[in-house]
Amino acid sequence: AFGKKKSTKPPSSHSDIEELTDSSLPASPKVPHHAGDCGSTSMKPSQSASAICECTEAEAEIILQLKSELREKELKLTDIRLEALSSAHHLDQIREAMNRMQNEIEILKAENDRLKAETGNTAKPARPPSESSSTASSSSSRQSLGLSLNNLNITESVTSDILLDEAGDGTGHKDGRSVKIIVSISKGYGRAKDQKSQAYLIGSIGVSGKTKWDVLDGVIRRLFKEYVFRIDTSTSLGLSSDCIASYCIGDLIRSHSLEVPELLPCGYLVGDNNIITVNLKGVEENSLDSFVFDTLIPKPITQRYFNLLMEHHRIILSGPSGTGKTYLANKLAEYVITKSGRKKTEDAIATFNVDHKSSKELQQYLANLAEQCSADNNGVELPVVIILDNLHHVGSLSDIFNGFLNCKYNKCPYIIGTMNQGVSSSPNLELHHNFRWVLCANHTEPVKGFLGRYLRRKLIEIEIERNIRNNDLVKIIDWIPKTWHHLNSFLETHSSSDVTIGPRLFLPCPMDVEGSRVWFMDLWNYSLVPYILEAVREGLQMYGKRAPWEDPSKWVLDTYPWSSASLPQDGPALLQLRPEDVGYEGCISTKEATTSKHIPQSDTEGDPLMNMLMKLQEAANYSGTQSCDSDSTSHHDDILDSSLESTL
């Protein structure tokens, strides 16, 4: 193409180049025009500049034409991809509707057969073959449809990745731009004036000048669905694309209940505005979707918590330290205040941090509050929610809440308490004070999977900002929750579940490979190992030797996600946990002595029922001496908190 354009030029330009070539290299044969240009540039700058300008003009015309064609094709391709995503979303809706209809048909068939059986229909033996065949055909059709849709989901994920990759390059186009999708969660709490909303980055898409509203709706819903699935691959937090109430693009609010705007979406992306804010269903829609998305607690568990709180008005969150009990209590209180519709929210929440010295003050405060609830004082505004933190420091919970026995139930505030473990007075509280207990243990949801969901959310946000996926960082993020579970299994084996480590220590993990390695080594050497040694030492003194010793640092080194080059050569080594550091060998005789009092050792090993009864007896004895052990529990918490402060 370059040669043809040169041939169309006047012969004078070609002869000028030949003259320049001859004058620059008189003793050499004629060379191609590129060599002549280079030689003439050093000798005669003005003549070479004019010749190059004539050549570059021809190149510029071709380049501009090719760029315009490429831009048009890219825009068409982007529109096709967006329409494909929207079509895939419609297919998902059709599949869900078909599954619902199929289930209804099967239920109706079963009901019809039951009615026929009750009326004594004699044609009953002929039904099962037809039913089985129809069921098999329906299941096969659903499987085939699911297979095709699954294949489509794979292509959609690839397409979404392409859109994310092209988003950074699309900013240079005149007709398309990269737009970030953000989910905004309103706090709805008067005290948090500096934080009225929390924004979460969930993705980035390309919006062209031809993108229609229905296509954009489908893309945003699809992006949200993929986001929650990646955070929680098992249940997607119980959320779906139906959780989206509306989204804001510029000054426009887009919702299904509103009419289609006059302009296309690109008409509202003016200036530097490249953000679309998604609003989820919340208190106004009588939904918990925004709460679930914010706290990363699966929806069925969240629904159970709210049902207990709204029905009984009094719950106690019980579990080890660092499991997020105080955080959950404040989140529940915020939602209850928003749901109550109280205008003056400054004094709507009363928080009381209990310690060894403030038990009498708490008892007096609750007694005065019970009197105000019993009296008909309409002018006095009582707190909507009372948060009682660290109730394990109270000697007798029944004495603390005795003042509420005669309190009017409909006027009594909601009470949310937190404590590090259950106490022996829990049945009395449930019977006489209508309290309900919520277990926040590390081996059950929502605490069990919270660390993985939290770290994956941080990882996704970093990937979107950097527009790149780091497989090494993905391995690290998957490995940290496994390490946490392995350490807790070790603590449960040699001590009890009350001293297991909560996910709080692992939440500050940096989102880069080298930074996370340094962070973990400091956390292991200065926080985890000292706490584990102390907890296992006290567990061996209380329960004796119950299992063979396995150093958890060996498992850590065997599954170490960082490269071998980054292992201890350039820094401090990972500390190991030796049995002599906790007095493990000296506990053998103690264990044998305690077991010999009840039954021979060989019999207990072969009888799982007897082992379970022994554990129940130990737990009963331990709960009976709870008041004596509260100091040791608080000692564990002090060690864990001091270790966390030193790490941070």
Image (cartoon, rainbow, N blue to C red):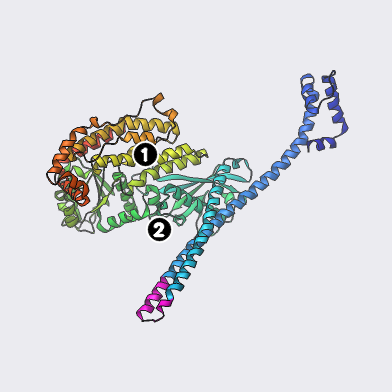
The percent position of residue 404, horizontal first and vertical second, equals 17, 54
Taking the view exactly as shown, the residue that stands out farthest to the left is 597
In reply to whether residue 297 is colored magenta, the answer given is no
Q: Secondary structure at mark 2?
A: loop
When the figure is inspected, residue 225 is found, relative to residue 2, above or below; the finding is below
Q: Amino acid at mark 1?
A: Leu
Q: Earlier in the sequence, mark 2 or mark 1?
A: 2
Q: Is residue 110 left or right of residue 364?
A: right
Quarter occupied by the C terminus: top left
Q: Amino acid at mark 2?
A: Glu
501 and 533: which one is in front?
533
Kindly report the distance in space between the C-alpha atoms of the residues bearing marks 2 and 1: 32 Å
- Which label belongs to residue 296? none
Quarter occupied by the N terminus: top right
- Which label belongs to residue 507? 1
For the question of whether residue 609 can be seen, the reply is yes
When the figure is inspected, residue 427 is found, relative to residue 324, above or below; the finding is below
Highlighted range, magenta: 107-126
